[in-house]
Amino acid sequence: MMYSREFLEQLYSTIYTIRIFETECIKLYRQGLIIGYFHPYLGEEAIATGVCAALRPDDYIVSTHRGHGHCIARGGQLKKMVAEVLGREAGYCRGRGGSMHIADIDTGNIGANGIVGGGIPIGVGAGLGISIRGSEQVVTIFFSDGACNNGVFAESLNLAAIWDLPVIFVLENNQYAVSSPIEEMSRIPDLHKRSEGYGVEASMIDGNDVLAVFEETQKAVRAGCEGKGPVLIEAKTYRHGGHHVNDPGLYMPKDKLEYYKAHDPVTIAREHLISQSDCTEQDIAEIEEKANRMMSEAVDYAKSCPQPSVENFLEEVKHN
Amino acid sequence: MSTDTGTERTERQIMYREALNEALREEMIRDETVFLLGGGIGQRGGSYKVTVDLLNEFGPKRVIDAPISEASFTGAGVGAAITGMRPVVEILFVDFTSLIIDQIVNQAAKYRFMSGGKGRVPMVLRTQGGSGNGLAAQHSQSLEAWYYHVPGLKVVMPSTPYDAKGLLKSAIRDDDPVIFIEHKLLYMQKGFVPETEYTVELGRADIKCPGQDVTVIAWSGMVPKSLAAAEELAADGIDAEVIDLRTLVPLDKDSILESVRKTERCLIVQEAVRRGGVASDIASIIQEEAFDYLDAPIRILAGHNTPIPFNLNLEKGSVPQQNDIVDAVKQLVG
């Protein structure tokens, strides 16, 4: 398929922005400015970027605890995201949600979720609403290999199938459920194979290749709009580190980690941009510079935002 | 406050389940985003016939039979609600809500809060509980305290056809998740329900029987038992006031306190097991805010701390009965 330079630049800009968001936030975490749990999307950026590039403004996404990439790819605002992970009133959730609970109603991002698998049925419900209204939207549910071993995955796949819902199940198979390797948690690590029993069409792709992700999602969107029901895309990928910032991921075999780090989604997107357009290294440097500047402005902004008022909070919850 | 349930009136009498059916039907006509989702609610019309004929009238897009996948179809209700629909999800027995706790407690209850107030989950979870039919330990529980405990949920437990209809309509129109718990012994009970449109506001208790000597606080299946007890007590010259809470969240604290300050004695009757129950919380509110008015310790009559037994005599013995209420009141005023 032929792509415009503008489109490839947009993909690269998004994928790079997710990378820079995570790396800068990890720095803030190390400085003690971010507390609690923070699950970086490093190494998986191509999935959110490729999927969201294929979606339309009215479509919905359901995110996960590893959700920053989904939010950014869907058009979320860096300033409100950083403000939220810093717990500020100006953040997406007014400092009441944090990293694991960012939702952005304006971009159709129903929200991240602190419960592994918890968002899967919710996405099915968004699909059910679309089906009842008869609108031409689709829902993309991001979830992980870990979530596949929760009962709601099986239930929800079946519900979407029997009701022919316009749902795209995007299985981000990063091969670890927290610290448990998929080979030990499932006899068949290619989890998309489970969908056959539910009558759901499935495919497996290289989740680190943003164009492969984009093309597969485009097909899925078309199927959803044509009333063909749900599809499942298994995007194989690998984290660049442990489960969260404070998990060194010592259980990840070195050779495998090195393989995936060399097969880096950001590098692959960059190669697509260079090889498929007349974009130069200089042009790419400018894209990166712009993303760096926006992230740096977002961090400065968030740091300057006031903490939520405890008095106001207590007043709000008084009559609950 | 005055009684608005028209219990003395003799106009149209219909069953509790018919009143619920009317509420669903009227709200589905009024608002096309309202739809029903649950097991066996379509052609079968629900185990207790609450949804009869609705499939024929509204079609399978709005009366949806779901597989036995409680967690996921409840979660589907949550997702539909977040994205602009008003689902009424039915779980056959409150006992089975153990299967949907994550979607209710971690998802529905917290979504508005976690999204900084921007998100809404206008969903009703209809279910039924209570003992009395010999359905044993997994089909007879009273689990309202689970949901009473979780911030972000409203909890509604009607005892009459009038309240059932008016409260269900309000619950459907509410922008927050509402746990609507019916009682299996009440479905066939008849009561006055007007032909004209009305709603009952959430968070308002109702004095089902005014009195001066003692306040009896009850909800759901314990209301008719308390009213029967009050009648028996009246014959003995004891004037009991029976307050039907109707909604546990929001709790109508003002009505409770006003009554207790008047009668200076209070009995709380709860079908659920005693330990960790709603009655204990109400008692703590009364002692904090009306201690000086009390002439006797607050009395709680509740279910024993046991799973509900199968044998009918044992079952009766495990939860408060009319004579238990009469005895408790007599001790309280004696």
Image: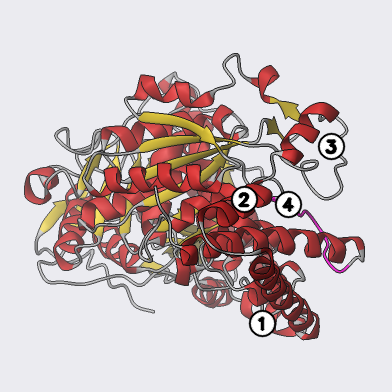
**Cα–Cα span, label 2 and label 1:** 54 Å
**Cα–Cα span, label 4 and label 3:** 12 Å
Disc 3 chain ID: A
Q: Which residue is mark 4?
A: A40
- Whether labels 4 and 2 belong to a single chain: the reply is yes
* Front position in the image: A310 or B303: A310
Three-letter code for the amino acid on which mark 3 is drawn: Gly
Quadrant in which residue B246 is drawn: bottom left
Disc 2 chain ID: A
Verify whether residue B186 appears in magenta: no
Q: First in sequence: mark 4 or mark 3?
A: 4
Q: Closer to the camera: disc 2 or disc 3?
A: 2
Three-letter code for the amino acid on which mark 4 is drawn: Pro
**Cα–Cα span, label 1 and label 3:** 42 Å
Q: Closer to the camera: disc 1 or disc 4?
A: 4
Mark seen at residue A249: 3
Q: Is residue A150 left or right of residue A107?
A: right
Q: First in sequence: mark 2 or mark 3?
A: 3
* Front position in the image: A25 or B22: A25
Q: First in sequence: mark 1 or mark 4?
A: 4
Q: Say whether marks 4 and 3 touch (CB < 8 Å).
A: no
- Magenta stretch, main secondary structure, is loop
Q: Closer to the camera: disc 1 or disc 3?
A: 3
| Residue bounds of the magenta highlight | A33-41
- Residue A282, horizontal then vertical, whole percent: 69, 69
> Does residue B283 appear anywhere in the picture?
yes
* Front position in the image: B323 or A19: A19
**Cα–Cα span, label 1 and label 4:** 34 Å
* Front position in the image: B187 or A150: A150
Name the residue located 43 percent from the left edge and 49 percent from the top edge: A140
Disc 1 chain ID: A
Mark seen at residue A315: 1
